[in-house]
Image (cartoon, rainbow, N blue to C red):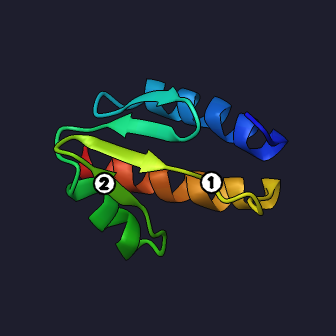
Amino acid sequence: FRTKPASLLYGVYSVLCSKSPMCSVRAHIYIAFDTPDSTTLPKKMRELGINIGSCGVQTVRLRPMMIFEEAYIAPLLAAFDSAFSQLA
């Protein structure tokens, strides 16, 4: 990863996804999640105030902006944790 926040974000997503059977994570220049339905998770995240998008039938991609800071990680992860809990 080019930035420390992106590297930290990937690490905590890996931990978060290990707790949810509906998520697997991989990273290249973005972080991708496989879910049973790529429309459900982004919709729930938007309800929680986080705008993410889908890619294909089962993949959600997150590409943090270059201005992404460590302070943004906790609220983003809290939203993902809440969405996974509500969708489980």
Instruction: Characterize the local packing of mark 1: few (<14), some (14-19) or many (20 or more) Cα atoms within 10 angstroms.
Output: some
Q: Earlier in the sequence, mark 2 or mark 1?
A: 2
Considering only vertical position in the picture, is 31 above or below 69? Answer: above
Image spot of residue 61 (x, y percent): 42, 47
Could you say whether the residue bearing mark 1 is in a helix, strand or loop? loop
Q: Quadrant of residue 25?
A: top left
Q: Is residue 59 in sight in this rendering? A: yes
User: Which of 47/27 is in front?
Assistant: 27
Could you say whether the residue bearing mark 2 is in a helix, strand or loop? strand
Considering only vertical position in the picture, is 76 above or below 24? Answer: below
User: Which of 87/43 is in front?
Assistant: 43
Residue at (42% x, 62% y) in the render: 52
Kindly identify the amino acid type of the residue bearing the numbered disc 2: Ser
Residue at (54% x, 30% y) in the render: 27
User: Which of 2/19 is in front?
Assistant: 2
Image spot of residue 34 (x, y percent): 31, 34
Instruction: Characterize the local packing of mark 2: few (<14), some (14-19) or many (20 or more) Cα atoms within 10 angstroms.
Output: many
Kindly identify the amino acid type of the residue bearing the numbered disc 1: Pro
Q: How far separated are the C-alphas under marks 2 and 1?
A: 14 Å
On screen, residue 72 versus residue 41, left or right, reads: right
Q: Which mark is residue 41?
A: none
Residue holding disc 2: 54
Considering only vertical position in the picture, is 45 above or below 80? Answer: below
Residue holding disc 1: 64
Residue at (35% x, 48% y) in the render: 85
Q: Is residue 86 in sight in this rendering? A: no
